[in-house]
Image: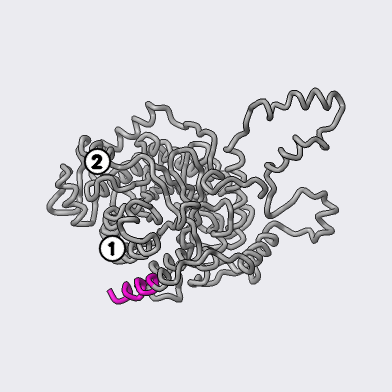
Amino acid sequence: MVGIPSFAERFRVRKSFDLLTGEERRAIHEAALRVMERTGVKIHSRAAREDLARAGAVVAREDALVRFPRDVVEDLRQKAPGTIVLAGRTKEFDLPMDRTHFYTTTDGCGISVWDAAKGERRQSVLEDIRRTALIGDWLPYLSIYEPMVVAHDVPEEVHVATGVKVAMETTEKHILSESTTNAREAQAQVELASAVVGSREELRNRHYMSAMLCPISPLSIDGAAADAALVWAENHVPVHITGMAEAGVSGPGTLAGDLVVNHAETLATVCMLEAHEPGAPAIYGSCLTVMDPKTGAYMAGAPESNLLAAGSIEMGKHCGLPISVGGMGPSAKGPGVEASLENAMWAMTCANYGGEVINGLGEPAGSTLLSYEQLLLDHEIARMIVWLYRGFDVNENTLAVDLIERVGVGGTFLAQRHTLEAMREVFLPMLWDGDAYDVWVKKGGKDPMVVAREKVAGILKTHEPAPLARDVARDLDRIVRRSARA
């Protein structure tokens, strides 16, 4: 890693491209506004509905349906900040979301773990969160850590807070919480984050953690999840609004129609957050997919799902909001070639069109199966994408005209200092090498999955993350114990 740039700077990318024209973006936006005003969105939180009614939305008395007049949507949307910084435990790991970076996170839906030695699944436990947080702390091109699995060995009422606590103890990087189900869990996590940064007021100013809210497609937001999101909003914890409309099942079969559903759900959630706490950070997100037309199954790795990710990014641009999108988390049943191919195509599409936070490293099988080996393979994919979209400089030094003239026709650049300096910046893979075949065989002929397994073992044995101060660690323990009694 010679010459590795500072943390946030290593994720800077040169430019992104557009999939949709301005007219196409406006058409999707207008269609979503019509859906919000005529069809409405069901929001199963009384507190959220009361906030929205005060802001001018039309709330039905007999059910949870909320209709959003156009002017209300536009007014509330403008209150959400266009740029934010996702903070680390220390400023070294701060990540500006300003449309010039490509960040990646681990995934957070795992319910089992792939045991590569036995070739079978096992139940996930708290130790898997500690181990993956330690690995994530070490991996130089993983930007954000998200507790990756359900800890089946922890009581259900505290498993979310316990997982977040272990993550905060183990990595200095920004923490993303995905699995919060109610306001009590959100409050506990706010207390944990506040203890690490020093106070709730400091947490409002320094976004050390962010959280995820997933609307229920089509056009519904769960009540307990909404109440949790209001807690996030009150404390200015950024909310990744992650719609999951599956084209043909919970959204129309057309890609444009699926984007309309997602856009309506996302805007409704932004309105809900801003009506409760003007200026609360909201991140435009999605993890949209298409169904298998033969079975109805989720197809995360399909080209259509890639296009839906790109379309969602386009609509985030249209709204001027920070953008988070599911760019990994493949349909492949386990780690390996299929998972890596699906993730590479999906994540590269997101980078190409301007996705800022790409969620999902390390968990194939629709984000349900943690694979330590796949985590390292996905990290390699992320590294290569950053290298690619960083581009290259064109200046007097890189054009090297004087050097070309000095070496001349038929010469070699191998012994030149200019070459030595340039080669220090060339991408070197962590899991494979450029050796000739016979040299590779003499070294053992190891498959990248085997190398990844060995690399995991080495990181777990040697990496020592920076610990929390002892008094802060004790505070975290007390917060989790107290939340168990709440």
The main secondary structure of the magenta stretch is helix
Residue under label 1, please give it.
Answer: 183
The magenta-colored residue range is 475-486
Point out which mark residue 76 bears: 2
Is residue 382 highlighted in magenta? no
**Residue 324 drawn at (x, y percent):** 43, 46
Label ID, residue 83: none
464 relative to 157 in the view: left or right: right
Q: Please state, as top left, top right, bottom left or bottom right, where the C terminus lies in the image.
A: bottom left
- Of residue 354 and residue 292, the one placed in the foreground of this image is 354
Q: Earlier in the sequence, mark 1 or mark 2?
A: 2
Q: Which of the two residues, 34 or 282, is positioned nearer the viewer here?
A: 282
Q: Tell me if I can see residue 254 in this picture.
A: yes
- In the rendered image of this protein, does residue 27 appear above or below residue 215? above
Amino acid type assigned to the residue bearing label 2 in the image: Leu
Tell me if residue 365 comes above or below residue 409 in the rendering: below
Q: Quadrant of residue 115?
A: bottom right
Label 1 is placed on what type of residue? Ala
Of residues 263 and 53, the one nearer the viewer is 53
Q: Say which element carries label 2.
A: helix
Visible in this render: residue 216? no
Kindly report the distance in space between the C-alpha atoms of the residues bearing marks 1 and 2: 23 Å
Q: Residue at x 60, y 47 (%)?
A: 383
Q: Position of residue 472 (x, y in %)?
A: 41, 68
- At x 86%, y 29%, the residue is 411
Q: Secondary structure at mark 1?
A: helix
